[in-house]
Amino acid sequence: MTDLTGAPGAALPAVDRRGLLARLRSDRFFLVGVVIVFLSLFLAAFGPLISPYDPLRSTGEISTPPPPIETWPRLLYETVSGQREAPPHWFGTDQSGLDVFSRVISAPRADMTIALGGALISLVIGTFLGLLAGFYRNWATEFMMRISDVLQSFPVFITAMILVALSGRQTGNLVLALALVYTPIFVRLTRAEVMAQSSRGYVQAALAVGNSRWTIAIKHVLPNSLVPSLVQMSVTVGFAIILTAGLSFVGAGVRPPTPEWGSMISIGAQQLILGEWWPSVFPGVAISLTVLGYAFVGHTIEAEFRET
Amino acid sequence: MHISWLHRLLVAFVAAIGMAGAAQAKDLLVLADDIPAGLDYDGPTASLIPTYGGIANLLEPLVYYAPGEVNEEGVQLLDFDKFEGRLAESWTYDPETFTWTFTLRQGVKGCNGATFNADDVVYTFARAKSVSGAAPIGWFLSNVGSIDGFTPAVFAQDESGAAARTLGDEVRKIDDYTVQIRQSGPNQLFLRVLTIFGLYIYDKETMEANATEEDPWSHTYNNNVNAPGFGPWCLDDWDKGAGFTVKANPDYYLGAPAYDRVVLRKVPQSANRVAILQSGRAQIAERLTPKEYDSLSKMDGVKVVSAYGNENLFLYVNYQVPPYDNLAMRKALAHAVPYDKIISTSYFGKARKWPGMIPTTYPGYHEASVQYAEDAEKARAYLAEAGYPEGQGLEAFPDALRITYIAEKESALGPTATVLQTALRDVGIPMELDPIPQTQYGERELVKKDMPLGLTDHVKPIGVDAAYGILLSYVTAAKGGIMNAMNYSNEAVDNALFATLNEADDAKRTATLVDIQETLMEELAMVPILEYKTHWATSADVTGVVWHPDNALHYYDFRPAE
C-alpha cells in the first residue's frame, strides 16, 4: 500500500483503487457484509421511526405467533394497499404484548450505539496510548502496558459486567465499559506496529532533518501504524455487539423494555419451554446476521491489507 | 408455526440434566426456585417463604385452623373462624384473668424420640422472649397476641431488659400436659398468632442438647442443622445450595404421612421447573409464572388448581418522596392503572381487582366506599390538580418516575410493568422500568424504605385478620409497621389500630377496622391493583391441595391419587 521506506514528506504511492474496487465488488461475502453493516446503521438511525408498532407499547395481544409464512405475500399486499386496520405482527408478539418485529428493527439503536460507541472510543484511546507506548519507551509507558496486561488478563465479559454493576446500567456507562475492556487490544496492536515503524529509515531521516519526535509520531508514524487497528475495528464491533447482548441477557445491560436484542432473547428464552420460540429466535437471528456482516467486512479488509 | 419437536426436545433435555436419579418410589419430588436457607424462625432468613415451608413441615403448632370448604377446583380451604387442636387437644379461656389454659396432647413423639409435654411449650415461649435471635419473630407474634410481658421492654440494654427477657409466669406449666398462657388484655389475635410458624413448638430436649455457652438457645444449630419438633416430617438431608429432603415421621400423631420422603429440589429457572414437571419426573412445581400455569393447565398429565388466598399485586408509593407525597398524584396513578387489561393479559383471568387494602378473604376485611377505576380522564385531571398538567413538571423527579420491581421476577412482573408503563405514559406520566436484583429490592423495601414506586406481588400478611394486616403494613414503621415500605404515617390510624387490638367488643372492633380501611383507601396508603389466585401445579397422580396462609407447601396434605 505505502512505501514505508520513503523519506519524510515523500508522496505515498497511490493505491490501485480501480483494482481494489473490482476485487471488492467480486467478493460476495464482502458485499453481503456491507449490506448488513449499512442496514444495521440505517436501523440504528431510523428503526424506531419506521417500525409498524411502537416498540415500547403493549399491543394487548399476548404471545401471538407469527403468521404462517405462506400468508406473508397476502398480508404484505393487504398492508401496502391499506386493506388492513393494523399491520400484521410479522414476528409475533411477546409475553408483554410487544410487537417482536418492531422491537427487532428498533434494537440496533441501543445495540449499535453501545457497540460502535465502545469500539470507536477504544480505537481512539487505544491507538493514542499505543502510539505513546511504542514511540516513547520509558517507565511510564511500561507501567501503562502492565496495566493493560492486567486488564486483558480478566475475561472481557466478567470485567464489563463488574464495571456496569459498579457504574449503573445507563447507556453511557455501558459504552464506557466496553471501551475500557477493548482499549488494551488497540494499545497492544498499535504499539507493536509503532515499534516496527520506529526503526524504519524514514523516521531516522525525519529526525535528522530536525522534526520533533512528537511531529514524527503524529504525522508519519501514526498514519503508517493504523492498518492493524482499523482491521481490528470491524472485528471488535462484532464482538461488542455480542458483549452488549450478553450483558443484557444476564440483566446487566439496558433496562427493559428498551428494545435490545440480548434482553429480548433473555426474556423470550423463558417462553421456549412453552413452545413460544419467536420472541427469542428472531432477535437471535438478528444478532448472528449483524455479527456475521461485520466479520465479512473485516475479513475482506484484512485480506486486502495483507495482500498489499 | 409451533415447532413441537423442538419443544419436546427441550423438555426431555432439561428433565434429563436436571433430575437424573432424583427420586425413588413413594417419594414426592417438589421443585422450587429456592430451598430453606435457615430453619430458625428467629433467625436471619425468617422472612423467606422457603424458610416458612421448612419450619411448617418439621414443627407443629399448638392450634390451627379447621378445614373449611373445598373450592370448585378441588382446593381445600380453611375456616378462619374455627380452630382445631394440634399439639393442644383443647383449651379454655378465662376472661377475668385473660388466661388461656391448654390441655396438651399425650403420646406425641418427635423425630429424635422425645415425647412432647408442657416443658416444650414453656421452652418455646422462653426462647421467644429471650429475643436472642437475629429476627425476634416469636417475640413479635407474642406481642401482637398480647401475651403478658412480651413488651418492647425486652430490648432495653440495661438490667431491666435482662429481667424483661426472662420468662415469668405468663406462660406456666401446670402439669406435664397442662399449660397456661396469660394475656395483658383481651386480644382476638391470640389464637391466630399461634397458627403462625413463628410460634410452632420446639423439641426442648434436642434443642438443649445442641446449646452452647455462647448460644444457649441453639440458634446456630437451629438455623444451620435442624429444627427439631413434633411435626409430620423429620429432616433427612439438607444441602443449602441444592436440596432439602425430609422423611416421614412414622409416629406422627395424626397418622404417618402418605409419602415416605419429600425431596425439595432447587431449580431456579421456572421454565426448567415446568419442563421437569411436564416430563413426569417431578410431582409438584412451585412458584411458576401466571403464563406457565396457564400453559400447564392445558397439558396432559399435569393438574393445575388455584384458589384466592392472600396473594396480591400493588404499587408502593413512597409518602416521603415527591411527587408521591401528593394525594392527587397518587389518585392519578390509581386511575391510570389498566386493571382489566392486567388481569386478562398478565394473569390470564386468574385474578380480580383488589378493592381494599387487606386480602378480601380475611376476617375484618371491608370493601371501602371509595374505589379507583381505570379512567384516563380522571387520571389526567388529578395529575393537573397535583400541579403537573399533562405531566409538565414531572421531569424534575427522574429518579421517582421508575417502576421498580424484582429483576428475577421479570417473567412474572415484566409484562405487568410494561402494560403499566404504557398506561401511565398515556396519561402523561413518563415512567421508566427499573428491575433490580432481589437482594437490593429487599433491602430497599424493608431496611432503607427509600423506593419511590415499587411493583410488588410478594407481600401477604400471614396473620389472618384485618388488624394484623393493618399493623404490619400501614402502622407507622417506627411503631411496628415492619412492612410499611411506603412510609405511610397517620397518627389517627395508629391510635385506632392499637386501641382495637385490645377491644373485647366485637362490634366496636369491627367498626374501628372499617373506619381505618376507609381512611387507608381514601388516602391511598398504596395503590392496590389485583388479587391473584394462588396456584399449584402437580402431576395428575397427586392430590390433596390445601391453601395455607403462609403460602408454603405443607407436604402432609399431599397423597397419591386413587
Image: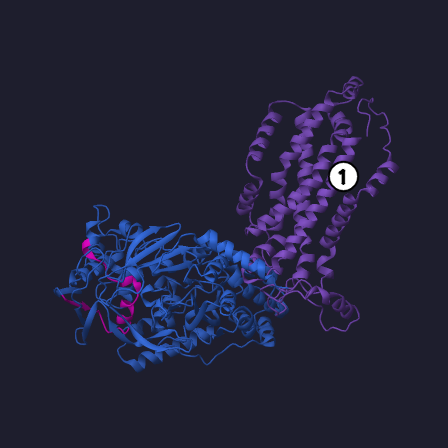
Q: Is residue B201 above or below residue B66?
A: above
Q: Is residue A130 above or below residue B20?
A: above
Residue B13 drawn at (x, y percent): 51, 54
Residue B60 drawn at (x, y percent): 26, 64
Q: Quadrant of the C terminus of chain A?
A: top right
Total count of labels: 1
Q: In which quarter of the image is the N terminus of chain A?
A: top right
Q: Identify the amino acid type marked 1.
A: Thr
**Residue with the mark numbered 1:** A300
Please give the range of residues in magenta: B177-205
Does residue B506 show up magenta in the picture?
no
- Number of other residues with Cα within 10 Å of mark 1, as a class: few under 14, some 14 to 19, many 20 or more: some
Residue A269 drawn at (x, y percent): 56, 57
Between B18 and A184, the one nearer to me in the picture? B18
Residue drawn at point x = 78 percent, y = 27 percent: A220
Using the rendered view, name the quadrant where residue B359 is placed.
bottom left
Q: The blue chain is which one?
A: B
Between B120 and B273, the one nearer to me in the picture? B273
Residue B48 in view here: no
Using the rendered view, name the quadrant where residue B380 is placed.
bottom right
Between B148 and B1, the one nearer to me in the picture? B1
Chain A drawn in what color? purple
Left or right, B319 with respect to A150, comes to: left
